[in-house]
Image (tube, rainbow, N blue to C red):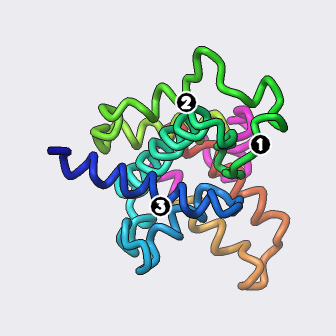
C-alpha cells in the first residue's frame, strides 16, 4: 500500500501531466498557484506565504516535474523543459542536445531524492541566504556603509533600524528623492546578508 506522500506525489504528477500535456507552457510559480486552486486543492491558499511551506511546495512540484519528464521521455512523448521561468512539453526532435538530460543532472538528482523534503527550517533559511548572497551585486561594503550613514562594525538590528529611518526619509511617496531611496535600498540589500 503506497504511503500518503507517495499517493500525493502520484496525484500531483498526474495533474501536471494533464495540464502540461494540453500544451500549457508556464512558469513554476504559475503551476504552484494552479495547484492551489479549489479545482486541484493540492496546496493551501497560504502555501506561498511561509518559508517552509514555500520550500515544500516548490520541492513537490519540482520532484513531480522531474518524474514526469522521465515518464514522457520513456514513452517518447516529448521532452519536458523545467526551469523557474518556463515549464512545457517540447518534441524530442526539437530539443537540442544540451536540453536533453545527460548522465548527470544535479537538479534532477536533488529533487528526485525525497530525503531533501525533510530539510529543516534552519537549512532552508541558510539555502535562501546563500542564494541571495550569490545574487546580490558583489560587495562594496565601504560605499554601502557610507550610503546608510553607518560605520563598521555594526549589527543586523542597527543596520535594519538605520535602513528603515533613511528609507522613510527618502521614500518617493513621502516627497523624498527616488534615486537616493534606490541607493539606500540597494546598499541595505547587499549588507543585510553579511549578518
Q: Are marks 2 and 3 in contact (CB under 8 Å)?
A: no
Whichever of callouts 2 and 1 sits on the residue coming sooner in the sequence is 1
Q: Mark 3 points at which residue?
A: 15
In this picture, which residue range is highlighted in magenta? 136-160
Question: In front here: 194 or 161?
Answer: 194
The front one of 51 and 108 is: 108
Disc 2 and disc 1 in contact, CB within 8 angstroms? no
Q: Residue furthest bottom?
A: 174
**Which residue appears at 78% of the width and 25% of the height?**
98
Q: Name the residue under label 2.
A: 107
The CA span between labels 1 and 3 is 20 Å
Q: Which residue is drawn at 42% across and 72% down?
A: 40
- Tell me the SS state at disc 1: loop
The Cα–Cα distance between marks 2 and 1, rounded to whole angstroms, is: 22 Å
Which circle marks residue 91 in the picture? 1
Q: Which residue is drawn at 64% across and 43% down?
A: 82
**Residue 27: x %, y % from top left:** 66, 57
Label 3 sits on a secondary structure element that is helix
Q: Residue at x 65, y 68 (%)?
A: 167
Amino acid at each position: 500500500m503506497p504511503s500518503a506522500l507517495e499517493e500525493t506525489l502520484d496525484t500531483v504528477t498526474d495533474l501536471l501531466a494533464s495540464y502540461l500535456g494540453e500544451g500549457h507552457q508556464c512558469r513554476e510559480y504559475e503551476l504552484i498557484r494552479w495547484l492551489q486552486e479549489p479545482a486541484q486543492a493540492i496546496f493551501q491558499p497560504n502555501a506561498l506565504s511561509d518559508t517552509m511551506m514555500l520550500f515544500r511546495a516548490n520541492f513537490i512540484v519540482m520532484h513531480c516535474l522531474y518524474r514526469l519528464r522521465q515518464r514522457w521521455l520513456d514513452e517518447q512523448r516529448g521532452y519536458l523543459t523545467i526551469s523557474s521561468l518556463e515549464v512545457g512539453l517540447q518534441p524530442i526532435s526539437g530539443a537540442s542536445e544540451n536540453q536533453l538530460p545527460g548522465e548527470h543532472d544535479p537538479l534532477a538528482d536533488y529533487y528526485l531524492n525525497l530525503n531533501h523534503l525533510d530539510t529543516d527550517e534552519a537549512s532552508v533559511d541558510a539555502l535562501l541566504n546563500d542564494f541571495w548572497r550569490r545574487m546580490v551585486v558583489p560587495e562594496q561594503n565601504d560605499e554601502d556603509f557610507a550610503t546608510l550613514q553607518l560605520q563598521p562594525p555594526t549589527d543586523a538590528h542597527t543596520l535594519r533600524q538605520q535602513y528603515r529611518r533613511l528609507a522613510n526619509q527618502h521614500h518617493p511617496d513621502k516627497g523624498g528623492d527616488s534615486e537616493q531611496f534606490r541607493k539606500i535600498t540597494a546598499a541595505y540589500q547587499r549588507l543585510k546578508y553579511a549578518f
